[in-house]
Amino acid sequence: MLRLLIPVVHHEGALQAARHAAFLFAERCVAEVELVEVLESPDQRRTTAFHFRSVLRRKQTHAMLSALKQTRAILDDAGVPYHWTRAFGPVAETIAARAAAGQSDAVIVDASQLGFLTRWWILAKLWRLSSTPVTMLR
């Protein structure tokens, strides 16, 4: 039985990854899922030159909470046991650290809402940083 790590990195959520985890749970392949809401620091973007950091953080947190709610609803409907945490930092580094700390057996990243370059960058960095197998869903 696997322990999966599903990072929520986009304001659209990780719906495909949650559906995949629900399918694997129904097939008795998954024991537990860890949802990690990954929030990047607003300082890493150029928008801080034009907006207050507190406003950017509040908007990001609000968008990610609605995404997390949708993702959690899929897991709840399927009866998948899970727990969620919030982590701050660069996306790839934070996911790799959480996978190592939580002793996850696999990481499933929902990249359906990410652009090609962002998807490629995150996957390449995760493969380099993590010893945990990474699956990216498109």
Image (cartoon, rainbow, N blue to C red):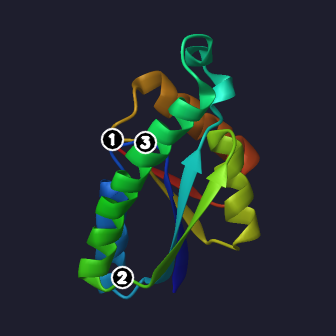
Q: Which one is closest to the eye, mark 2 or mark 3? A: 3
Q: Position of residue 111 (x, y in %)?
A: 40, 42
Q: Residue at x 59, y 34 (%)?
A: 54
Q: Secondary structure at mark 2?
A: helix
The image quarter in which residue 44 lies? top right
Q: Residues within 10 Å of mark 1 (few under 14, many from 20)?
A: some
Farthest residue to the top: give it: 49
User: For this rendering, which residue is in front, 124 or 14?
Assistant: 14
Residue 101: where, in percent of width, then height?
Answer: 75, 68
* C-alpha span from label 1 to label 3: 10 Å
Q: Amino acid at mark 3?
A: His
Residue picked out by circle 3: 10
Tag of residue 25: 2
In the rendered image, is residue 110 in sight? no
* Residue 41 in the image: above or below residue 45: below
Looking at the rendered structure, the secondary structure element under dot 1 is: loop
Residue at position x 50%, y 28% from top? 118
Q: CA distance from mark 1 to mark 2?
A: 21 Å
Horizontal placement of 123 versus 60: left or right?
right
Closer to the N terminus: mark 1 or mark 2? 2
On screen, 31 above or below 72? below
- Mark 2 and mark 3: Cα distance apart in space: 24 Å
Residue on which disc 1 sits: 112
Residue 63 lies in quadrant? top left
